[in-house]
Image: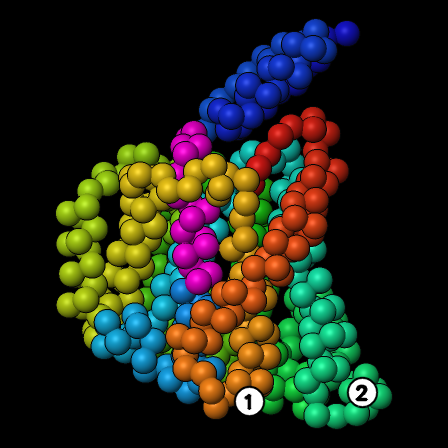
Amino acid sequence: MKANLRIDEIEYERCAILRKKLKKAGGRLPVIAVLNKMPTSNNITLLRHIAAILVLINHSFDLMGRSESDPISLLTGGHTSSSRIGLIFFFFISGLLITQSLFSSDNIKHFLWKRILRIYPALIVVVLMTVFVLGPLFTRLPVGAYFSHGMTWEYLSGGISLIRLRFFLPDTFNENGVNGSLWSLPIEFRFYILLAIFFVAGILKNGARRTAIILFILVVYLFYGYLPQSALSAYFGPYVRWSAFFFLGSYVYFFREKIKMSLWILLALLILWYLMRNIEMAGRFTELICFSYMVLFLSYHTPVIGKNFFSKNDFSYSIYIYAFPIQQMILHCLADKIMPWGLAGLTAIALVPFCYFSWRYIEKPASRLKHVFSPKGLADDN
């Protein structure tokens, strides 16, 4: 019996795999509509590593009370920081790639399952290691009191679920928390869910609706700072700030090949942003456009660096989630004997075994389970 498989939107790379599967089954592919093929050779994975390292560098200065000496903060007169640039890269790239992943998934369950596998396995391991290894070693409490304290189990449940996330363990690194990097993960995962809702509602397949949504998000992003301060506005503030970068990345996915890429345009945008950086609304808007354009330019219009390495390895996520607790442990032991750049360097060295372990034994094996909700069993690397 011939396979009768219809695909409405599918990436070019997956079509070849599907054809081979159908040919073996004696079937044929009735309909293929290729949606904006993504270049397979790019610097996106490299940029994610750079983003994670920028966050690491900034935290090295922040944790030592030297935020003003962060290199990008010095370069921009304190207007932005290494961590902010790194997070801009992360959220914009995520919007771009997660949209590609959504359109290459077989159904919404398949899409969300892939996102769960990308976020949770490594996260669960780092949270377990934090609670059951780091905490008992560095808490000032007796071990029995540490494990009987409610904060310990709140940290565990919040970290594993990303619901009501906690940052402190009882009497452990009291000033800055245990892992301050995790705050962005629940925000990003909720963006995944919202993107899936837009897809189901038919918004992403309609150009006018896509444009209306991104314009709404941008307007909220630009004007949110003018609202009266309240607990509610403080809670939604991070969602508003980072939604602009994530959903702009998603929006750009649909017409990125039409965007003119030029080093001169990038330089002009950088100069414009620098000149506008102290003007509230203009500074935010030019920052959004400038650094989003920078990601596209560096990803697709510069020579590919480390293609063989980065096509097989992605340590960016493990760098991001492991660096902060490692920095805290180093500071605990060497607080008076180290400077921020030394902290960053030692952290980078200490990260190597953790990142290798996480990628080799947690993240990569987890990715092999991504087709549980994919009835076609198609290959997808996103």
For the point 38% across and 78% down, the residue is 227
The crowd level at tag 1 (other Cα within 10 Å; few <14, some 14-19, many 20+) is: few
Q: Is residue 230 visible?
A: no
- Percent across and percent down for residue 263 are 19, 46
Secondary structure of the residue carrying numbered label 1 = loop
For the point 76% across and 74% down, the residue is 132
For the point 31% across and 39% down, the residue is 303
Q: Quadrant of the C terminus?
A: top right
The magenta-colored residue range is: 36-53
Mark 2 or 1: in front is 2
Q: Is residue 108 above or below residue 185?
A: above
Q: CA distance from mark 2 to mark 1?
A: 20 Å
Between 318 and 156, the one lying in front of the other is 318
Count of numbered circles on the image: 2
- Percent across and percent down for residue 211 are 37, 46
Q: Amino acid at mark 1?
A: Glu
For the point 51% across and 25% down, the residue is 13
Q: Earlier in the sequence, mark 2 or mark 1?
A: 2
The crowd level at tag 2 (other Cα within 10 Å; few <14, some 14-19, many 20+) is: some
The colour scheme of the drawn protein is rainbow
Q: Kindly identify which residue carries mark 1.
A: 175
Q: Quadrant of the N terminus?
A: top right
Q: On residue 143, which mark appears?
A: 2
Is residue 359 left or right of 161 when viewed as pictured? left
Q: Amino acid at mark 2?
A: Val
Q: On residue 348, which mark appears?
A: none
Q: Is residue 156 above or below residue 356?
A: below
Secondary structure of the residue carrying numbered label 2 = helix
- Percent across and percent down for residue 96 are 44, 45
